[in-house]
Image (spheres, helix red, strand yellow):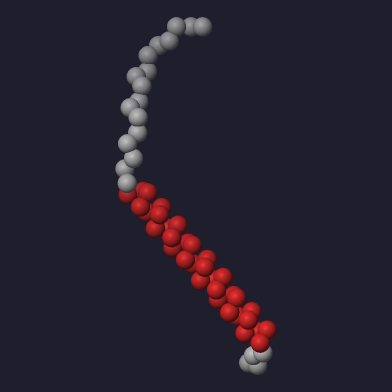
Amino acid sequence: MYMNIDTARAETAYRQERIKREFGRATARRERRERASQSETRPARRALRPTPAA
């Protein structure tokens, strides 16, 4: 395949975009996994009591 300067630049730009996209996905995946592993404390549920009719 014949490569000229423009083709080389386009190929390099494509590779950089692909690497950036893959890195972003891996980071997001790791953050989601960390958030899922941490159990968040939730406020206690209020007891259901009958309320007076308005």
Q: Is residue 37 left or right of residue 3?
A: left
Seen in the picture, residue 51 relative to 13 is either above or below; the reply is: above
* Image location of residue 3, percent across then percent down: 64, 90
* Image location of residue 19, percent across then percent down: 51, 71
Q: Is residue 45 left or right of residue 52?
A: left
Asked which quadrant contains residue 41, the reply is top left
Seen in the picture, residue 20 relative to 1 is either above or below; the reply is: above
Quarter the N terminus occupies: bottom right
Asked which quadrant contains residue 31, the reply is bottom left
| Residue drawn at 37 percent across, 49 percent down | 35
Count of labels in the image: 0
Seen in the picture, residue 50 relative to 43 is either above or below; the reply is: above
Q: Nearer the viewer, residue 17 or 1?
A: 17
Q: Nearer the viewer, residue 50 or 28?
A: 28
Seen in the picture, residue 52 relative to 19 is either above or below; the reply is: above
* Image location of residue 47, percent across then percent down: 34, 19
Q: Is residue 14 left or right of residue 39?
A: right
* Image location of residue 9, percent across then percent down: 63, 81
| Residue drawn at 52 percent across, 66 percent down | 21
| Residue drawn at 35 percent across, 52 percent down | 34
| Residue drawn at 37 percent across, 54 percent down | 33
Q: Is residue 39 left or right of residue 50?
A: left
Going by the picture, which residue comes out furthest to the bottom? Answer: 2
